[in-house]
Amino acid sequence: MTTYPHSIRLETEQQQFLTILSREDALARFQAALFPRSVPSETRALADALGLPLSEDITAPIDVPPFDRSNVDGFALRAADLMSASQARPVQLTLNPESITCGTLPRFPVLGGSATPIATGGPLPRGADAIIMVEHTHPVEANSIEVRRAVSPGQFVSSAGSDMAQGEVLLRAGTVIGSREIGMLAACGIAQVAVARRLRVAILSTGDELVQPGEKLRPAGIYDANGPIISAAIVENGGEAHFLGAFPDDEAGLEKAMREALAAHDVLILSGGTSKGAGDVSHRIIDRLGKPGIIAHGVALKPGKPLCLAVCDDKPVIILPGFPTSAMFTFHDMVVPVLRRMAGLPPRVDAQVSAQLPFRVPSELGRTEFVMVSLVQGREGLAAYATGKGSGAITSFTQADGFVRIEALSDHLPAGSQVPVTLFTPQVRVPDLVIIGSHCTGLDLVIGELSREAVSVRSLAVGSLGGLAAAKRGECDLAPIHLLDPSTQTYNTSFLSDGLELVPGWRRMQGLVFRLGDARFEGRGAQEAVQAALADPECMMVNRNQGAGTRILIDQLLGLARPDGYWNQPRSHNAVAAAVVQKRADWGVTIAPVAHAAGLGFTPLTQEHYDFALVSDRRDKAAVQAFLAALQRPGTHAALEKAGFTSASRPGVD
């Protein structure tokens, strides 16, 4: 038997993806392998049936109401007695010697010329066919009333069975029990109902790198987010989630866990181990668990291509991609429809809104792509900003309002296009204050002040230039910027246009960041250190994204030089520091507070002005005023100083 080096074996195994199916084809094959099938049912007490679908029709065992009853406080009478009643010719009726209240049976019939006092809900006495409200009568003597208006037969009377008639179908099979349905069933005296049993879903996370929340994070380890988030999503869709833990990439141990989970549950869901790398073993186990086995492995989705769908002895087995965003999109798009159908639940209906894309959104031909977006209110309607954090970013879900779908035959969505946005929640969450532009850890301190005042804030990091463009379009209230004009060597003011005004923020020191002890940087000035880095072909930098104020500063520093690592362009100061700490780069440019927090060396480069471009016609907005007030507070100044910033409003700061 020929053996191969590990690198060759890994490359060979990664090329063994099965045929990539379209989203529609994969879903159709998966459903065809599972349906038709009966929905498992059980009998539950009414109070325990909330959220579950009925497994059979329910008919009314009694009339509701079970007797003719009054809808108002008044008098039960015969409508014929008041046919001639008017203001000029009042009719006098004699009162019967009883008052009917809820739960009391009438003792006396209502004869011609008589009436009986009755409360709302009281049963109608024999002979009565209408109710007149008490405020439309006048007492006469001790036992009579005078009426000056006619009434119609049946007025203010609910007849027996007028709400629900005995034998009538109240609720059809498949109806999801909510509070209204519980009230209806209780009114009929029904205490137990047959409902679809919640699906028992087992969840396993796979991967040697996984660490459970609460445990110490080891080197090269990551916390397991997929297990908890998938479990919560199963509960949200009517299932009973059983998270069984994270398992290393050991084939024998994982197979044992998968077999035990499948035997005790209706569905088995795993995350990770679908990409056919040498360490990915879960998909290799499936065909040993039952027929027909793998239905689809590889779907033309982005994110979500490695999705694996299988059916083992009539039970679905799903292996979701390992990255959280990929896992959740494929779960909601491909798995939720199947789980809800198995559980007898109706298809999920998501709300949609229309929004305009401020920027071009590229896509990959041949794959249906889901792009998460955050919504803001512009001058001409909603604008949708792509979050753009990648399939490994769990924060994308919490920061986004919904997603845009790009069909497989499109390679992009053009800027300015109007697109449907599928919402994650039933309504659009409109924040009180929208901030779009450059991000800074100091900004988090100010936003924290506003949060304590119950002011909701949406902050989107798109860089200084992107923030200015958003402000000009009226898509934000404030745009944080730190842009140096090379012709004047001044910050920010020259970049403002009509309708924008500058609000001073704070000063922060930008500088070179490096690992302590690196002789190429230690003890040198910024220019000398950069020249030393450029002279060493082994010295790798980490850059910043285009449009960021820091990127403009870096390009001025480098001139025409493009050292190794120049095209590594993370979107935050923290990412630059992390690249240097983890030795993926040797130097970069970040702000002093981030460098010091990371334990890195720092050589000052320039003190930049981090200010805010305010949309002038938003100045009087309550949330904007709250932000401006927070900037001026001594407590905010103190927090900024402690974090390593200098407030622009501090005396002596230009």
Image: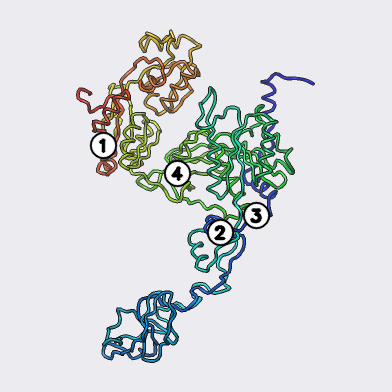
Residue found 77% across the figure and 20% down from its top: 2
Q: Which mark is residue 40?
A: 3
The residue at which mark 1 appears reads as 628
Earlier along the polypeptide chain: callout 2 or callout 4?
2
User: Relative to residue 615, is residue 2 depicted above or below?
Assistant: above
**Which kind of residue does numbered mark 2 sit on?**
Ala
Marks 4 and 3 close (CB-CB < 8 Å) = no
Counting from the top left corner in percent of width and height, residue 654 is at 22, 24
**Which kind of residue does numbered mark 1 sit on?**
Leu
Eye-nearest disc, 2 or 1: 2
How many residues crowd around disc 2 within 10 Å: few (fewer than 14), some, or many (20 or more)?
Answer: few
Using the numbered discs, state the Cα–Cα distance from disc 4 to disc 3 in whole angstroms. Answer: 35 Å
Image quarter hosting the N terminus: top right
Q: Secondary structure at mark 2?
A: strand
Q: Secondary structure at mark 4?
A: loop
User: Relative to residue 183, is residue 513 depicted above or below?
Assistant: above
Using the numbered discs, state the Cα–Cα distance from disc 2 to disc 4 in whole angstroms. Answer: 37 Å
In the foreground, 95 or 651? 95
The residue at which mark 2 appears reads as 45
Using the numbered discs, state the Cα–Cα distance from disc 1 to disc 4 in whole angstroms. Answer: 27 Å
The quadrant where residue 294 appears: top right
Eye-nearest disc, 4 or 3: 3
How many residues crowd around disc 1 within 10 Å: few (fewer than 14), some, or many (20 or more)?
Answer: some
